[in-house]
Image (spheres, rainbow, N blue to C red):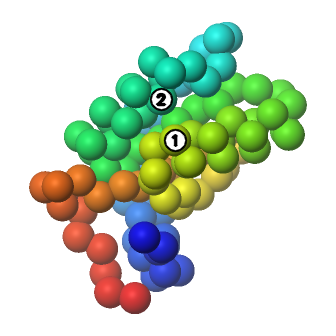
């Protein structure tokens, strides 16, 4: 699934007021953290994940791994915040067409 620019703008607007659901700790990206992100996506569909690292390359690698492991769409990255979207079976968020 690939999001169009219009859909990304819609999701960015919805995500604006959200607080981060997942905060990565000092252990980084573990299987437990990936499972929590997966659960949060199933429940909320649209979430923010905070990746508190000063190393830019490491941050990009962690964010790419999260997107790959959860099979979610990366909507936006702002600083240390990653916004993810993955539709659930309930389809809580209806996206605008293309």
Residue at 42% from the left image edge and 33% from the top image edge:
37
Residue situated in front as seen by the camera: 97 or 9: 97
- Counting from the top left corner in percent of width and height, residue 57 is at 85, 40
Residue at 42% from the left image edge and 76% from the top image edge:
7
Q: CB atoms at circles 2 and 1 under 8 Å apart? A: yes
The residue identified by callout 2 is 34
- Counting from the top left corner in percent of width and height, residue 24 is at 58, 22
- Counting from the top left corner in percent of width and height, residue 6 is at 46, 82
Label 2 neighbour load within 10 Å: few <14, some 14-19, many 20+: some
Residue at 83% from the left image edge and 28% from the top image edge:
54
Q: CA distance from mark 2 to mark 1?
A: 7 Å
The residue identified by callout 1 is 69
Name the secondary structure under disc 2. helix
Extreme-left residue of the structure: 90
* Above or below 57: residue 33: above
Q: Seen in the image, is 75 located left or right of residue 40?
A: right
Residue 18 seen: no
Q: Quadrant of the N terminus?
A: bottom left
* Above or below 17: residue 74: below
Residue situated in front as seen by the camera: 87 or 92: 87
Extreme-bottom residue of the structure: 98
Q: Of marks 2 and 1, which one's residue comes earlier in the chain?
A: 2
Name the secondary structure under disc 1. helix
Label 1 neighbour load within 10 Å: few <14, some 14-19, many 20+: some
């Amino acid at each position: 699934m690939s999001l169009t620019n219009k859909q990304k703008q819609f999701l960015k607007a919805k995500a604006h007021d959200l607080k981060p659901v997942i905060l990565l700790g000092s252990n980084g990206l573990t299987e437990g953290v990936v499972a929590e992100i997966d659960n949060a996506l199933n429940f909320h569909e649209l979430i923010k994940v905070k990746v508190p690292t000063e190393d830019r390359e490491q941050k990009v690698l962690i964010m790419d791994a999260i997107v790959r492991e959860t099979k979610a769409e990366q909507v936006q990255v702002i600083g240390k915040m990653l916004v993810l979207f993955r539709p659930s079976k309930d389809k809580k968020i209806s996206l605008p067409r293309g």
